Image (tube, helix red, strand yellow):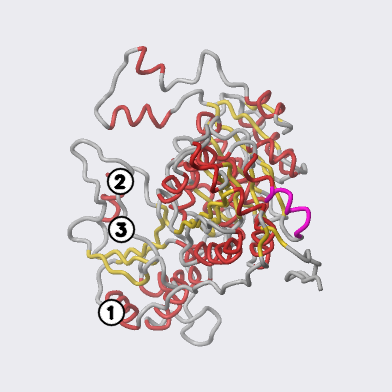
Amino acid sequence: MASANQAGARLPETFNGAESLVATLVASGIEVCFANPGTSEMHFVSALDRIPGMRPVLCLFEGVVTGAADGYARMAGKPACTLLHLGPGFANGMANLHNARKAQSPVVNVIGDHATYHERYNAPLTSNVTGFAESISHWVRRPRSPRTVAADAARAVRAACEAPGRIASLILPADTAWLAAERPAPRLEPCVPAPVSDAAVEAAARALADGGRTAILLRGAALHGPGLEAAGRIAAKTGAVLFCDTFTPRRRAGAGAPVVEKLAYRGQAVLQRLAEFDRLLLVGGEPPVSFFAYPDQEGWLTPPDCAILTLAHAHEDGNAALAMLAEAVGATASGAGPGAVARIVAPFDPPALPAPSANGPLTAEAVMRVVAALLPEEAIVADEGITSTLPHAGLLGTAAPHDYLALTGGSIGGILPLSTGAAIGAPGRKVVALEGDGSAMYTLQALWTQAREKLAVVTVIYANRSYAVLNQELRLVQAASKGELALSLLDLHNPSLDWVHLAEGMGVPAVRAETAPAFADAFAEALRGSGPRLIEAVI
Protein backbone atom coordinates (compact mmCIF):
# COMPACT_ATOMS: atom_id res chain seq x y z
CA MET A 1 0.00 0.00 0.00
CA ALA A 2 1.32 3.46 -0.88
CA SER A 3 2.44 5.64 2.01
CA ALA A 4 1.69 9.34 2.60
CA ASN A 5 3.88 12.22 3.70
CA GLN A 6 2.99 14.79 6.37
CA ALA A 7 0.78 16.76 3.93
CA GLY A 8 -1.26 13.67 3.09
CA ALA A 9 0.07 13.34 -0.47
CA ARG A 10 0.72 9.88 -1.80
CA LEU A 11 4.29 8.60 -1.97
CA PRO A 12 5.72 5.90 -4.26
CA GLU A 13 5.45 2.21 -3.40
CA THR A 14 9.23 1.83 -3.64
CA PHE A 15 12.09 4.27 -3.31
CA ASN A 16 15.55 4.83 -4.60
CA GLY A 17 18.05 6.64 -2.40
CA ALA A 18 17.26 10.08 -3.81
CA GLU A 19 13.53 9.61 -3.34
CA SER A 20 13.99 8.44 0.23
CA LEU A 21 16.19 11.50 0.81
CA VAL A 22 13.69 14.02 -0.56
CA ALA A 23 10.78 12.37 1.27
CA THR A 24 12.74 12.45 4.54
CA LEU A 25 13.66 16.10 4.09
CA VAL A 26 10.03 17.02 3.46
CA ALA A 27 8.86 15.00 6.46
CA SER A 28 11.51 16.80 8.52
CA GLY A 29 10.11 20.22 7.63
CA ILE A 30 12.31 21.19 4.67
CA GLU A 31 10.09 22.97 2.13
CA VAL A 32 12.56 24.77 -0.16
CA CYS A 33 15.63 23.59 -2.08
CA PHE A 34 17.96 26.23 -3.54
CA ALA A 35 19.78 24.40 -6.29
CA ASN A 36 22.50 24.46 -8.92
CA PRO A 37 22.63 20.78 -9.90
CA GLY A 38 24.85 18.77 -12.21
CA THR A 39 25.06 15.20 -13.50
CA SER A 40 25.61 13.59 -10.10
CA GLU A 41 22.42 15.19 -8.72
CA MET A 42 20.00 14.20 -11.51
CA HIS A 43 18.25 11.52 -9.46
CA PHE A 44 17.58 14.09 -6.72
CA VAL A 45 16.21 16.44 -9.40
CA SER A 46 14.01 13.69 -10.78
CA ALA A 47 12.74 12.78 -7.32
CA LEU A 48 11.28 16.28 -6.90
CA ASP A 49 8.59 15.35 -9.45
CA ARG A 50 7.59 12.20 -7.57
CA ILE A 51 7.90 13.35 -3.96
CA PRO A 52 5.49 16.21 -3.19
CA GLY A 53 6.24 19.05 -0.79
CA MET A 54 9.57 20.52 -1.93
CA ARG A 55 9.84 23.84 -3.80
CA PRO A 56 12.92 23.88 -6.04
CA VAL A 57 14.53 27.28 -6.71
CA LEU A 58 17.17 27.43 -9.43
CA CYS A 59 20.14 29.73 -8.82
CA LEU A 60 22.74 30.40 -11.50
CA PHE A 61 25.74 30.37 -9.19
CA GLU A 62 26.41 28.37 -6.06
CA GLY A 63 27.15 31.51 -4.02
CA VAL A 64 23.56 32.53 -4.70
CA VAL A 65 22.36 29.08 -3.61
CA THR A 66 24.04 29.25 -0.22
CA GLY A 67 23.36 32.95 0.37
CA ALA A 68 19.67 32.43 -0.38
CA ALA A 69 19.55 29.52 2.06
CA ASP A 70 21.00 31.86 4.70
CA GLY A 71 18.37 34.55 4.06
CA TYR A 72 15.57 31.99 4.05
CA ALA A 73 16.69 30.55 7.38
CA ARG A 74 16.95 33.96 9.03
CA MET A 75 13.37 34.85 8.14
CA ALA A 76 11.64 31.45 8.15
CA GLY A 77 13.37 30.32 11.34
CA LYS A 78 14.12 26.90 9.86
CA PRO A 79 16.49 25.45 7.28
CA ALA A 80 16.16 25.15 3.54
CA CYS A 81 18.34 22.66 1.76
CA THR A 82 20.87 23.43 -0.93
CA LEU A 83 21.74 21.16 -3.86
CA LEU A 84 25.36 21.55 -4.99
CA HIS A 85 27.46 19.78 -7.61
CA LEU A 86 30.49 17.93 -6.23
CA GLY A 87 33.47 19.60 -4.60
CA PRO A 88 33.88 22.53 -7.03
CA GLY A 89 30.19 23.43 -6.74
CA PHE A 90 30.38 23.34 -2.97
CA ALA A 91 33.57 25.41 -3.07
CA ASN A 92 31.79 28.06 -5.13
CA GLY A 93 29.19 28.32 -2.37
CA MET A 94 31.55 28.36 0.60
CA ALA A 95 31.84 32.15 0.94
CA ASN A 96 28.16 32.58 1.69
CA LEU A 97 28.12 29.44 3.81
CA HIS A 98 30.76 31.26 5.86
CA ASN A 99 28.30 34.14 6.26
CA ALA A 100 25.53 31.69 7.15
CA ARG A 101 27.73 30.02 9.76
CA LYS A 102 28.54 33.39 11.35
CA ALA A 103 24.82 34.22 11.27
CA GLN A 104 24.11 30.92 13.05
CA SER A 105 21.64 30.07 10.30
CA PRO A 106 20.48 26.46 9.99
CA VAL A 107 21.35 25.11 6.53
CA VAL A 108 21.25 21.57 5.13
CA ASN A 109 23.59 21.03 2.17
CA VAL A 110 23.09 18.12 -0.19
CA ILE A 111 26.33 17.73 -2.16
CA GLY A 112 26.38 15.31 -5.06
CA ASP A 113 29.49 13.22 -5.61
CA HIS A 114 30.82 10.56 -7.92
CA ALA A 115 29.49 7.03 -7.52
CA THR A 116 31.43 5.15 -4.85
CA TYR A 117 32.99 2.76 -7.36
CA HIS A 118 34.01 5.64 -9.68
CA GLU A 119 36.28 7.33 -7.13
CA ARG A 120 39.27 5.14 -7.99
CA TYR A 121 39.47 6.56 -11.51
CA ASN A 122 40.32 10.12 -10.38
CA ALA A 123 37.93 11.65 -12.92
CA PRO A 124 38.25 15.38 -13.69
CA LEU A 125 35.71 16.48 -11.04
CA THR A 126 37.12 14.25 -8.32
CA SER A 127 38.08 16.28 -5.25
CA ASN A 128 38.22 16.07 -1.48
CA VAL A 129 34.54 16.90 -1.01
CA THR A 130 34.57 15.73 2.59
CA GLY A 131 37.52 17.98 3.38
CA PHE A 132 35.78 20.96 1.81
CA ALA A 133 32.60 20.29 3.75
CA GLU A 134 34.36 19.70 7.06
CA SER A 135 36.14 23.04 6.80
CA ILE A 136 32.90 25.00 7.18
CA SER A 137 30.20 22.59 8.39
CA HIS A 138 29.34 21.56 11.93
CA TRP A 139 28.09 18.13 10.79
CA VAL A 140 29.17 16.05 7.75
CA ARG A 141 28.13 12.59 6.56
CA ARG A 142 28.85 10.60 3.39
CA PRO A 143 26.63 7.52 3.20
CA ARG A 144 28.08 4.51 1.39
CA SER A 145 24.76 2.72 0.95
CA PRO A 146 21.34 3.89 -0.26
CA ARG A 147 19.83 2.20 2.79
CA THR A 148 21.34 4.78 5.14
CA VAL A 149 20.64 7.92 3.08
CA ALA A 150 17.24 8.62 4.63
CA ALA A 151 18.43 8.14 8.20
CA ASP A 152 21.40 10.42 7.55
CA ALA A 153 19.06 13.04 6.04
CA ALA A 154 16.93 13.09 9.18
CA ARG A 155 20.07 13.46 11.28
CA ALA A 156 21.27 16.29 9.03
CA VAL A 157 18.10 18.30 9.61
CA ARG A 158 18.30 17.76 13.35
CA ALA A 159 21.96 18.78 13.34
CA ALA A 160 21.20 21.97 11.41
CA CYS A 161 18.42 22.89 13.84
CA GLU A 162 20.58 22.47 16.93
CA ALA A 163 20.73 25.80 18.75
CA PRO A 164 21.75 28.37 17.78
CA GLY A 165 21.73 27.08 14.16
CA ARG A 166 24.33 25.00 12.32
CA ILE A 167 25.60 23.99 8.89
CA ALA A 168 24.95 20.31 8.09
CA SER A 169 26.34 18.75 4.92
CA LEU A 170 25.22 15.43 3.45
CA ILE A 171 27.49 14.19 0.65
CA LEU A 172 25.49 11.96 -1.71
CA PRO A 173 27.45 9.57 -3.98
CA ALA A 174 25.54 9.14 -7.23
CA ASP A 175 25.00 5.39 -6.82
CA THR A 176 23.45 5.84 -3.37
CA ALA A 177 20.92 8.11 -5.09
CA TRP A 178 19.90 5.74 -7.91
CA LEU A 179 20.03 2.37 -6.13
CA ALA A 180 17.05 0.98 -4.26
CA ALA A 181 16.41 2.15 -0.71
CA GLU A 182 13.99 0.88 1.88
CA ARG A 183 11.86 3.83 2.98
CA PRO A 184 12.02 7.46 4.15
CA ALA A 185 13.11 8.06 7.73
CA PRO A 186 10.84 9.72 10.30
CA ARG A 187 11.47 13.23 11.52
CA LEU A 188 13.83 13.55 14.46
CA GLU A 189 12.86 16.15 17.02
CA PRO A 190 15.49 18.91 17.12
CA CYS A 191 17.29 19.84 20.29
CA VAL A 192 15.72 22.92 21.89
CA PRO A 193 17.88 25.76 23.22
CA ALA A 194 19.33 24.91 26.61
CA PRO A 195 17.86 26.71 29.62
CA VAL A 196 20.05 29.22 31.39
CA SER A 197 20.99 28.50 34.97
CA ASP A 198 19.34 30.26 37.89
CA ALA A 199 22.85 31.27 38.95
CA ALA A 200 23.39 33.18 35.69
CA VAL A 201 20.14 35.10 36.14
CA GLU A 202 20.90 35.85 39.79
CA ALA A 203 24.41 37.08 38.96
CA ALA A 204 23.06 39.38 36.26
CA ALA A 205 20.36 40.72 38.57
CA ARG A 206 22.92 41.44 41.30
CA ALA A 207 25.16 43.25 38.82
CA LEU A 208 22.30 45.44 37.64
CA ALA A 209 21.42 46.27 41.26
CA ASP A 210 24.99 47.04 42.31
CA GLY A 211 25.09 50.42 40.62
CA GLY A 212 27.36 51.49 37.82
CA ARG A 213 26.48 51.50 34.15
CA THR A 214 25.67 48.28 32.29
CA ALA A 215 25.80 47.63 28.55
CA ILE A 216 23.73 44.64 27.44
CA LEU A 217 24.99 43.12 24.18
CA LEU A 218 22.23 41.11 22.44
CA ARG A 219 22.58 38.60 19.61
CA GLY A 220 20.56 35.83 18.03
CA ALA A 221 16.86 35.25 18.64
CA ALA A 222 16.85 37.76 21.52
CA LEU A 223 17.06 40.55 18.94
CA HIS A 224 13.81 39.65 17.22
CA GLY A 225 11.95 37.42 19.67
CA PRO A 226 9.98 38.05 22.88
CA GLY A 227 13.20 38.56 24.82
CA LEU A 228 13.71 41.89 23.05
CA GLU A 229 10.63 43.33 24.71
CA ALA A 230 11.87 42.08 28.07
CA ALA A 231 15.26 43.64 27.37
CA GLY A 232 13.55 46.94 26.73
CA ARG A 233 11.82 46.75 30.10
CA ILE A 234 15.11 45.86 31.81
CA ALA A 235 16.75 48.91 30.22
CA ALA A 236 13.90 51.17 31.31
CA LYS A 237 13.99 49.85 34.87
CA THR A 238 17.75 49.74 35.43
CA GLY A 239 19.21 52.36 33.10
CA ALA A 240 21.16 49.72 31.17
CA VAL A 241 21.81 50.40 27.48
CA LEU A 242 21.01 47.79 24.83
CA PHE A 243 23.55 47.10 22.09
CA CYS A 244 23.92 44.73 19.14
CA ASP A 245 26.87 43.78 16.96
CA THR A 246 27.63 45.89 13.90
CA PHE A 247 26.72 42.96 11.65
CA THR A 248 24.02 41.11 13.51
CA PRO A 249 22.03 38.39 11.69
CA ARG A 250 18.53 39.74 12.29
CA ARG A 251 17.17 42.58 14.39
CA ARG A 252 13.68 43.90 14.97
CA ALA A 253 13.94 47.63 14.39
CA GLY A 254 12.03 50.80 13.70
CA ALA A 255 9.07 52.37 15.46
CA GLY A 256 7.78 50.47 18.47
CA ALA A 257 10.88 48.31 18.87
CA PRO A 258 13.11 48.68 21.93
CA VAL A 259 15.99 51.03 21.21
CA VAL A 260 19.12 48.98 20.48
CA GLU A 261 22.35 50.78 19.64
CA LYS A 262 24.46 49.18 16.94
CA LEU A 263 28.16 49.01 17.80
CA ALA A 264 30.36 51.02 15.48
CA TYR A 265 32.34 49.26 12.75
CA ARG A 266 35.68 50.78 13.70
CA GLY A 267 37.31 49.40 16.83
CA GLN A 268 38.45 52.70 18.28
CA ALA A 269 34.88 53.97 18.35
CA VAL A 270 33.70 50.79 20.11
CA LEU A 271 36.40 51.13 22.76
CA GLN A 272 35.45 54.73 23.39
CA ARG A 273 31.75 53.88 23.71
CA LEU A 274 32.20 50.89 26.01
CA ALA A 275 34.60 52.89 28.19
CA GLU A 276 31.46 54.61 29.49
CA PHE A 277 30.28 51.36 31.13
CA ASP A 278 31.31 49.38 34.19
CA ARG A 279 30.15 46.03 32.86
CA LEU A 280 29.15 44.27 29.66
CA LEU A 281 26.34 41.72 29.96
CA LEU A 282 26.28 39.18 27.11
CA VAL A 283 23.07 37.60 25.84
CA GLY A 284 23.68 35.12 23.03
CA GLY A 285 26.92 36.64 21.82
CA GLU A 286 30.59 37.15 22.53
CA PRO A 287 32.65 40.20 23.51
CA PRO A 288 33.28 42.47 20.51
CA VAL A 289 36.54 42.35 18.59
CA SER A 290 37.79 44.40 15.66
CA PHE A 291 37.14 43.09 12.17
CA PHE A 292 40.86 43.08 11.39
CA ALA A 293 44.15 43.64 13.15
CA TYR A 294 45.67 47.07 12.59
CA PRO A 295 49.15 48.31 13.50
CA ASP A 296 49.18 50.02 16.89
CA GLN A 297 45.46 49.43 17.51
CA GLU A 298 43.74 47.20 20.05
CA GLY A 299 41.74 44.28 18.63
CA TRP A 300 39.96 43.31 21.89
CA LEU A 301 37.27 45.95 22.20
CA THR A 302 36.12 45.60 25.81
CA PRO A 303 38.07 48.11 27.95
CA PRO A 304 40.11 46.52 30.80
CA ASP A 305 37.98 48.11 33.52
CA CYS A 306 34.68 46.97 31.96
CA ALA A 307 33.74 43.63 33.56
CA ILE A 308 32.22 40.92 31.32
CA LEU A 309 29.30 38.83 32.54
CA THR A 310 27.32 36.23 30.55
CA LEU A 311 23.59 35.82 31.00
CA ALA A 312 23.06 33.39 28.10
CA HIS A 313 25.47 31.63 25.76
CA ALA A 314 24.60 31.23 22.06
CA HIS A 315 23.21 27.71 22.52
CA GLU A 316 21.03 28.78 25.46
CA ASP A 317 17.56 30.31 25.48
CA GLY A 318 18.27 34.04 25.50
CA ASN A 319 14.59 34.95 25.20
CA ALA A 320 13.69 33.03 28.34
CA ALA A 321 16.77 34.33 30.13
CA LEU A 322 15.75 37.95 29.51
CA ALA A 323 12.21 37.26 30.71
CA MET A 324 13.62 35.75 33.91
CA LEU A 325 15.99 38.65 34.39
CA ALA A 326 13.19 41.18 33.88
CA GLU A 327 11.21 39.49 36.64
CA ALA A 328 14.25 39.34 38.89
CA VAL A 329 14.88 43.10 38.64
CA GLY A 330 11.20 44.02 38.91
CA ALA A 331 10.78 45.10 35.30
CA THR A 332 7.24 43.84 35.02
CA ALA A 333 5.36 43.89 31.74
CA SER A 334 3.84 47.19 30.65
CA GLY A 335 0.16 47.32 31.51
CA ALA A 336 0.48 44.61 34.16
CA GLY A 337 -0.80 46.82 36.97
CA PRO A 338 0.82 49.07 39.56
CA GLY A 339 4.56 49.40 39.14
CA ALA A 340 4.51 48.25 35.50
CA VAL A 341 7.61 49.32 33.59
CA ALA A 342 7.42 50.63 30.03
CA ARG A 343 9.94 49.77 27.36
CA ILE A 344 12.35 52.28 25.90
CA VAL A 345 11.01 52.20 22.35
CA ALA A 346 11.68 54.12 19.14
CA PRO A 347 8.98 56.54 17.98
CA PHE A 348 7.64 56.63 14.45
CA ASP A 349 9.42 59.70 13.16
CA PRO A 350 10.97 59.02 9.74
CA PRO A 351 13.03 61.75 8.08
CA ALA A 352 11.39 64.11 5.62
CA LEU A 353 11.75 63.47 1.92
CA PRO A 354 14.15 65.76 0.04
CA ALA A 355 12.57 68.83 -1.53
CA PRO A 356 11.68 68.45 -5.23
CA SER A 357 14.03 71.35 -5.94
CA ALA A 358 17.03 69.57 -4.35
CA ASN A 359 18.70 68.79 -7.65
CA GLY A 360 22.29 68.55 -6.45
CA PRO A 361 24.24 65.30 -6.73
CA LEU A 362 22.77 62.30 -4.93
CA THR A 363 24.46 61.37 -1.66
CA ALA A 364 24.50 58.19 0.40
CA GLU A 365 22.79 60.03 3.25
CA ALA A 366 19.98 61.20 0.95
CA VAL A 367 19.43 57.64 -0.23
CA MET A 368 19.04 56.39 3.34
CA ARG A 369 16.74 59.29 4.21
CA VAL A 370 14.44 58.32 1.36
CA VAL A 371 14.53 54.64 2.29
CA ALA A 372 13.72 55.46 5.93
CA ALA A 373 10.92 57.85 4.95
CA LEU A 374 9.18 55.49 2.53
CA LEU A 375 9.95 52.10 4.05
CA PRO A 376 6.69 50.13 4.25
CA GLU A 377 5.59 48.58 7.51
CA GLU A 378 6.94 45.04 8.04
CA ALA A 379 9.53 45.40 5.31
CA ILE A 380 12.83 43.53 5.49
CA VAL A 381 16.00 45.59 5.02
CA ALA A 382 19.07 43.62 3.90
CA ASP A 383 22.15 45.83 4.14
CA GLU A 384 25.61 45.47 2.62
CA GLY A 385 26.18 49.08 1.67
CA ILE A 386 29.09 49.29 4.18
CA THR A 387 30.69 52.73 3.63
CA SER A 388 27.48 54.07 2.07
CA THR A 389 25.08 52.79 4.72
CA LEU A 390 26.91 52.35 8.04
CA PRO A 391 27.25 56.11 8.73
CA HIS A 392 23.54 56.66 8.08
CA ALA A 393 21.89 53.44 9.32
CA GLY A 394 20.60 55.29 12.39
CA LEU A 395 18.03 56.98 10.15
CA LEU A 396 16.17 53.65 10.04
CA GLY A 397 15.72 53.75 13.82
CA THR A 398 12.47 55.72 13.64
CA ALA A 399 11.22 54.31 10.32
CA ALA A 400 8.23 51.97 10.08
CA PRO A 401 8.61 48.66 11.97
CA HIS A 402 10.86 46.29 10.04
CA ASP A 403 13.43 43.52 10.27
CA TYR A 404 17.06 44.38 9.56
CA LEU A 405 19.51 41.81 8.16
CA ALA A 406 23.24 42.41 7.88
CA LEU A 407 26.28 40.79 6.30
CA THR A 408 27.45 38.70 9.24
CA GLY A 409 30.65 37.06 8.11
CA GLY A 410 32.27 39.87 6.14
CA SER A 411 32.43 37.85 2.93
CA ILE A 412 31.04 40.44 0.54
CA GLY A 413 28.52 39.54 -2.11
CA GLY A 414 26.00 38.11 0.34
CA ILE A 415 23.11 40.54 0.26
CA LEU A 416 21.60 39.96 -3.18
CA PRO A 417 21.30 36.20 -2.47
CA LEU A 418 20.29 36.88 1.15
CA SER A 419 17.43 39.14 0.04
CA THR A 420 16.35 36.49 -2.45
CA GLY A 421 16.06 33.83 0.25
CA ALA A 422 14.47 36.26 2.71
CA ALA A 423 11.70 37.03 0.21
CA ILE A 424 10.93 33.31 -0.11
CA GLY A 425 11.17 32.78 3.66
CA ALA A 426 8.79 35.66 4.41
CA PRO A 427 6.30 35.83 1.53
CA GLY A 428 4.09 38.90 1.45
CA ARG A 429 6.74 41.20 2.89
CA LYS A 430 8.65 43.72 0.79
CA VAL A 431 12.44 43.27 0.86
CA VAL A 432 14.76 46.26 0.39
CA ALA A 433 18.36 45.31 -0.43
CA LEU A 434 21.00 48.01 0.07
CA GLU A 435 24.13 46.97 -1.81
CA GLY A 436 27.41 48.45 -3.03
CA ASP A 437 28.25 48.14 -6.70
CA GLY A 438 31.50 46.26 -6.09
CA SER A 439 29.92 43.74 -3.72
CA ALA A 440 26.93 43.22 -6.00
CA MET A 441 29.15 41.97 -8.82
CA TYR A 442 30.03 38.88 -6.79
CA THR A 443 26.51 37.46 -7.01
CA LEU A 444 24.48 39.53 -9.49
CA GLN A 445 23.02 36.22 -10.75
CA ALA A 446 20.61 36.47 -7.79
CA LEU A 447 18.65 39.03 -9.81
CA TRP A 448 17.76 36.34 -12.35
CA THR A 449 16.32 34.13 -9.62
CA GLN A 450 14.35 37.09 -8.24
CA ALA A 451 12.89 37.66 -11.70
CA ARG A 452 12.05 34.00 -12.28
CA GLU A 453 10.41 33.64 -8.86
CA LYS A 454 8.71 37.07 -9.09
CA LEU A 455 10.06 38.08 -5.70
CA ALA A 456 9.16 41.42 -4.09
CA VAL A 457 12.74 42.67 -3.75
CA VAL A 458 13.74 46.30 -4.33
CA THR A 459 17.50 46.49 -4.79
CA VAL A 460 19.34 49.78 -4.34
CA ILE A 461 22.85 49.74 -5.83
CA TYR A 462 25.13 52.42 -4.38
CA ALA A 463 27.16 53.19 -7.49
CA ASN A 464 30.26 54.92 -6.20
CA ARG A 465 32.42 53.12 -8.79
CA SER A 466 34.84 52.00 -6.10
CA TYR A 467 35.66 49.46 -3.42
CA ALA A 468 35.39 52.42 -1.07
CA VAL A 469 35.91 50.46 2.13
CA LEU A 470 39.27 49.21 0.82
CA ASN A 471 40.46 52.76 0.32
CA GLN A 472 39.87 53.21 4.06
CA GLU A 473 41.59 49.94 4.87
CA LEU A 474 44.63 50.94 2.82
CA ARG A 475 45.16 53.83 5.21
CA LEU A 476 44.33 51.96 8.41
CA VAL A 477 46.83 49.19 7.83
CA GLN A 478 49.42 51.88 7.09
CA ALA A 479 49.84 50.80 3.49
CA ALA A 480 48.55 54.04 1.99
CA SER A 481 49.62 54.61 -1.58
CA LYS A 482 48.80 57.15 -4.23
CA GLY A 483 50.36 55.07 -6.96
CA GLU A 484 48.28 54.23 -9.99
CA LEU A 485 48.82 50.47 -9.70
CA ALA A 486 47.57 50.25 -6.11
CA LEU A 487 44.59 52.53 -6.68
CA SER A 488 43.61 50.69 -9.85
CA LEU A 489 42.75 47.63 -7.76
CA LEU A 490 40.19 49.63 -5.76
CA ASP A 491 38.56 51.53 -8.61
CA LEU A 492 35.56 50.42 -10.73
CA HIS A 493 35.92 52.85 -13.63
CA ASN A 494 37.29 52.08 -17.08
CA PRO A 495 34.74 50.76 -17.81
CA SER A 496 32.02 51.84 -15.39
CA LEU A 497 29.41 49.26 -14.49
CA ASP A 498 25.98 49.87 -16.01
CA TRP A 499 23.55 48.44 -13.49
CA VAL A 500 20.46 49.34 -15.49
CA HIS A 501 21.57 47.13 -18.35
CA LEU A 502 22.94 44.43 -16.03
CA ALA A 503 19.62 44.19 -14.20
CA GLU A 504 17.52 44.28 -17.34
CA GLY A 505 19.68 41.52 -18.78
CA MET A 506 18.67 39.42 -15.77
CA GLY A 507 14.97 40.25 -16.28
CA VAL A 508 14.69 42.88 -13.53
CA PRO A 509 13.31 46.34 -14.45
CA ALA A 510 15.79 49.04 -13.48
CA VAL A 511 16.30 52.80 -13.46
CA ARG A 512 19.18 55.14 -12.67
CA ALA A 513 18.89 58.04 -10.21
CA GLU A 514 21.43 60.85 -9.88
CA THR A 515 19.54 63.33 -7.65
CA ALA A 516 17.64 62.91 -4.38
CA PRO A 517 14.20 63.74 -5.87
CA ALA A 518 14.80 61.33 -8.73
CA PHE A 519 15.77 58.60 -6.29
CA ALA A 520 12.70 59.30 -4.12
CA ASP A 521 10.43 58.99 -7.15
CA ALA A 522 12.16 55.79 -8.30
CA PHE A 523 12.04 54.20 -4.85
CA ALA A 524 8.35 55.04 -4.37
CA GLU A 525 7.55 53.59 -7.78
CA ALA A 526 9.55 50.44 -7.05
CA LEU A 527 7.68 49.90 -3.79
CA ARG A 528 4.35 50.21 -5.59
CA GLY A 529 5.32 47.64 -8.20
CA SER A 530 5.18 43.87 -8.01
CA GLY A 531 8.13 41.60 -8.51
CA PRO A 532 11.76 42.71 -8.32
CA ARG A 533 13.02 46.21 -9.15
CA LEU A 534 16.51 47.74 -9.13
CA ILE A 535 17.63 51.34 -8.71
CA GLU A 536 21.17 52.38 -9.56
CA ALA A 537 21.86 55.26 -7.14
CA VAL A 538 24.82 57.18 -8.54
CA ILE A 539 26.63 58.76 -5.59
Q: What percent of the width, then of the height, locates residue 156? A: 53, 62
Which one is in front, 358 or 270?
Answer: 270
Quadrant for the N terminus in the image: bottom right
Q: Secondary structure at mark 2?
A: loop
Residue lying at 28% horizontally and 79% vertically, measured from the top left: 206
Q: Which part of the image, by quadrant, shows the C terminus? A: top right
Q: Which numbered marker is on residue 256? A: none
Kindly report the distance in space between the C-alpha atoms of the residues bearing marks 3 and 2.
Answer: 10 Å
Tell me which amino acid carries mark 2. Ser
Residue at 66 percent of width and 41 percent of height: 458
Per the image, the residue denoted by label 1 is: 206
Check disc 3 and report the residue beneath it: 287
- Distance between the Cα atoms at labels 1 and 3? 20 Å
Labels 2, 1: front one: 2
Spot the residue most to the bottom.
338
Q: Earlier in the sequence, mark 2 or mark 1?
A: 1
Picture residue at 36% right of the left edge, 69% below the top? 239
Q: Going 64% across and 36% down the picture, which residue do you hit?
A: 60
